[in-house]
Amino acid sequence: MKKKILFILCILFFAVKVNAAIYVSNTNTVVVGNTVTFRVTVSSTTPLGSGKYNVTYDDRLLRYTGGSKLVDTFVAQNESTKSVTFTFSFVTRDVGNASFRFNLNEFYLLSEAPGGTGSKTSTVNIVKPKYYSSNNYLKNLKVADYDINFNKDKLTYDITLKETRTSIVIGADKMEATQTITGIGEVPLEEGMNKKTIEVRAENGSVRTYTLNIFVPEKAPIKIKIKDEEYSIVKRKIPDLAGYTKDKLKINDEEVEVLKNDKYTILYVKDSKGNVSKVLKEKDNYKKILEFNNTLYAISKDKEKKGNYEYFKALNLTTSKENNYRYEITEKTLQIEEVKKEVKKISVDKIVIIVLSSILILTYVIFIIIYLKRRKIK
């Protein structure tokens, strides 16, 4: 990997005769092909006037690319100027020690008094560029207790383990010491497909990714029965539910994920056709849950279908109130069924009928008695 780098070099100090001083900055080492910049400062304790300079350098190792002129005359910007700075940039051509020399040939102070002259030399060591390896192959990739038949050019491996495995150890051997590897060591496993990636980064930063698709079969499902229907509990990776937090619960000595709030515990179950639904867990009992308009209803009794309606008793998990409900199948509407009021109405109607019947019977009996008495008198 080759990088173009601009070097600003360390400062050196050189005093010239009476009042002038020259600072030249340079670095110790530069890679061939990179740019090096020499920074020269001429200063005085009293205001500067003008001067002349020239620059010499090793043109076999350095190629001038710009900046201040190599030969020039300078004049101070104003009467308070006490220093001037020049920059000279070069591209390094070859390996070796390259010299740079700044010659201050004439120098006058603002007072037109001579400020002294002098030279300053600096060197830079030019070296070969460092090679950064691009090798991002693995020498070997290992999975404990399993032979993956590794090939450095093959990036994906499929593995099936026993259902009892909950973790696995992944190991890898570098092909070069400068490589870095991530994704190895002991990693946890869950039932189902586990995708594990191992990244190999070469010295130059390039990355190669190996992938392990590790399948762990599901353990024997946990079965429950609700109204003679059998369901399998969904053990892991259950969906979130507003108002509930995920928790873990042991059922049949196996840990499963559940949803809980301060009152209720909800599980996800799957029927024989693979349909997933929610159920309410109350100790060792389970109730089916109907979700309607973002409200959950735990059904207490079997649904009774009459025509286009379903009747059932359910607990509203938001209000914690239990009611009888009527569900209209076509329109998909849900209403509280006022069963008690209907029963009361029916009872009143029966009483009215009984009273009226009794009055009629009593009237008929009285009529018979009167008739019989009149007949005896005659």
Image (cartoon, rainbow, N blue to C red):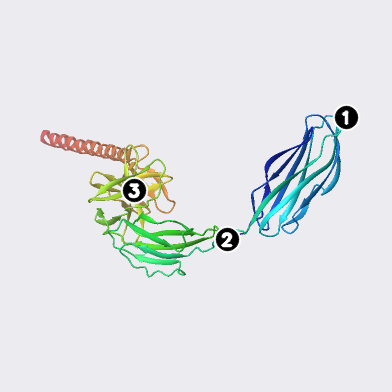
**Does residue 246 appear to the left or right of 12 in the view shown?**
left
Most foreground residue, 363 or 251: 251
Q: Amino acid at mark 3?
A: Ile
Most foreground residue, 375 or 269: 269
The label number, if any, that marks residue 87 in the structure image: none
Q: Nearer the viewer, mark 3 or mark 1?
A: 1
Q: CA distance from mark 1 to mark 2?
A: 56 Å
Q: Amino acid at mark 1?
A: Ser
Q: Is residue 1 above or below residue 119?
A: below
Pointer 3: what residue? 289
Quarter of the figure with residue 105: top right
Most foreground residue, 306 or 253: 253
**Does residue 262 appear to the left or right of 357 in the view shown?**
right
Number of residues whose C-alpha sits closer than 10 Å to that of mark 1, classed few (under 14), some (14–19) or many (20 or more): few
Pointer 1: what residue? 111
Residue 178 horizontal/vertical position (percent): 49, 58
Number of residues whose C-alpha sits closer than 10 Å to that of mark 3, classed few (under 14), some (14–19) or many (20 or more): many
Q: Earlier in the sequence, mark 3 or mark 2?
A: 2
Residue 277 horizontal/vertical position (percent): 35, 53
Q: Earlier in the sequence, mark 3 or mark 1?
A: 1
Residue 221 horizontal/vertical position (percent): 27, 58
Q: Is residue 147 above or below residue 375?
A: below
Q: Amino acid at mark 2?
A: Tyr
Q: Is residue 223 above or below residue 154?
A: above
